Image (cartoon, rainbow, N blue to C red):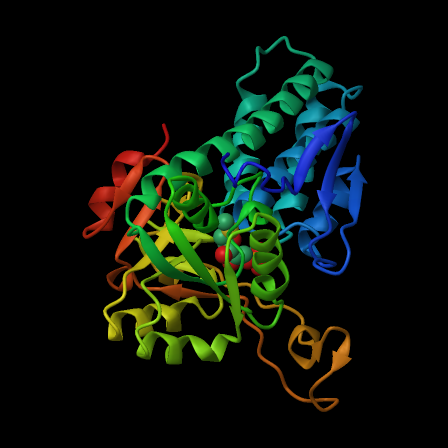
Amino acid sequence: MEKTQQAVRPIYYADGSCYMLDQRLLPVEERWHAYRDYREIAEAIKTMVVRGAPAIGVAAAYGAAFAAAELAQQAPADFEERFAASCTELGATRPTAVNLFWALERMQRCAARMDSKATPAQIATRLLEEAQSIAREDEAINRALGAHGQRLLPQRATVLTHCNAGALATAGYGTALGVIRAAVAAGKKIDVIADETRPFLQGARLTAWELQHDHIPVTLICDNMAGYMLQQGRIDAIIVGADRVAANGDTANKIGTYPLAVLAQAHKVPFYIAAPVSTIDYTIPDGTHIPIEERDSAEVTTCGGQRIAPEGIQVYNPSFDVTPAHLISAIITEHGVVGGDYLQELAPFKEG
Ligand code: MRU
């Protein structure tokens, strides 16, 4: 039996609602929310009920579909204007993960491609189908990506990952953890080392939870322990996800990814990015153009609701960093694994 089939689906549509597993509460509580209003979905993205680049894209697509449904009785000109404004609102939630903008553009293109005689109600119906397609495709893409990526791993390997690029960060199966799931399904013996990922603890709370849930061996470490393990030769590969890949392969991912890439190079350990093509931003030539989100200082000054730093302390809390392409051994996509000259190698994947 494939051990990976029961991977959680953190976001799905049913009976007129978009259901999301509240990722702020894991692993202590598994609480689901049902959303019917695009404004609530925008808030859920902003406050990280849902997080991870592909999952944010899926949430935004459902948000756009709900906004369209709300406007279904409007005159066509009003519908167009107010639908665009709702998409702008959804896009203003988080700046770094490009899947958010990719999904909103796809939804807007879908509306624009409808017959000129289509009513707002017909457009809204079509947009809900499109959002459901985005969610379905995302899981299929992750499975394809996983199948390509798992070939990079030997029969036995200890793999370090950072943040959560798993089923929880997507519509299902995961990107970096998708590669690990595919390797396990192929009969390989994979041990995962999960960085805790301060300050939001996606590694400790989410990666540890979902791998334990799927019976994939996982050991949790604090972020500052990775160097020691690499020095001891206890890590065979590092695989992480991505929030935005520039045309030249420079990659934004969760803060703390760049130092891991530097460590990987120092210890001659392969460093892989696993990301769907929807995470590649072909409009920017390199990583210097990627907007980096800064989040609330309370994420740094508190832990589990407990204050851990003095009142009034100055805080800097960038949520992502950029790993230069030359530190990346390969980028794993649904179309295959590429390496070397990323500008050239990623170009053919660009969607029409
Ligand atoms: O702030 P988050 O939790 O949304 O950040 C998520 C990450 O950085 C993930 O590694 C990335 O989105 C890849 S998810 C498949």
- Farthest-out residue, top: 117
Reply above or below: 318 against 183. below
Q: Position of residue 275 (x, y in %)?
A: 41, 46
Residue at far bottom of view: 310
Question: Which residue is depicted at the point 54% across and 56% down?
Answer: 164
Question: Looking at the picture, how far across and down is residue 133, in whole percent?
Answer: 56, 25
The residue nearer to you, when weighing 214 against 272, is 214
Residue 261 occupies quadrant? bottom left
Looking at the picture, how far across and down is residue 55, in whole percent? Answer: 58, 44
Location of residue 352 by image quarter: top left
> Residue, x 67% and y 71% (percent of image)?
296
**Image check: 291 left or right of 130?**
left
- From this viewpoint, is residue 97 visible? no
Observer-nearest of 9 and 328:
9
Q: Decide if residue 291 is on the left or right side of residue 31.
A: left
Q: Residue at x 68, y 29 (%)?
A: 65
Residue 194: percent from left, percent from top: 50, 64
Q: From where the camera sits, is residue 331 visible? A: yes
Task: Using the image as rendered, state which of residue 30 and residue 73 is in the foreground.
Answer: 30
Q: Does 152 appear above or below 36? A: below
Check the image and report above or below for 286 versus 82. Answer: below
Q: Work out whether residue 299 or residue 152 is closer to the camera in this orientation and state it.
A: 152
Question: Which residue is found at the position 77% from the left and 56% from the top?
Answer: 29
Residue reaching furthest front? 1
- How many labels, in total? 0
| Position of residue 27 in the picture relative to residue 31 (left or right) | left
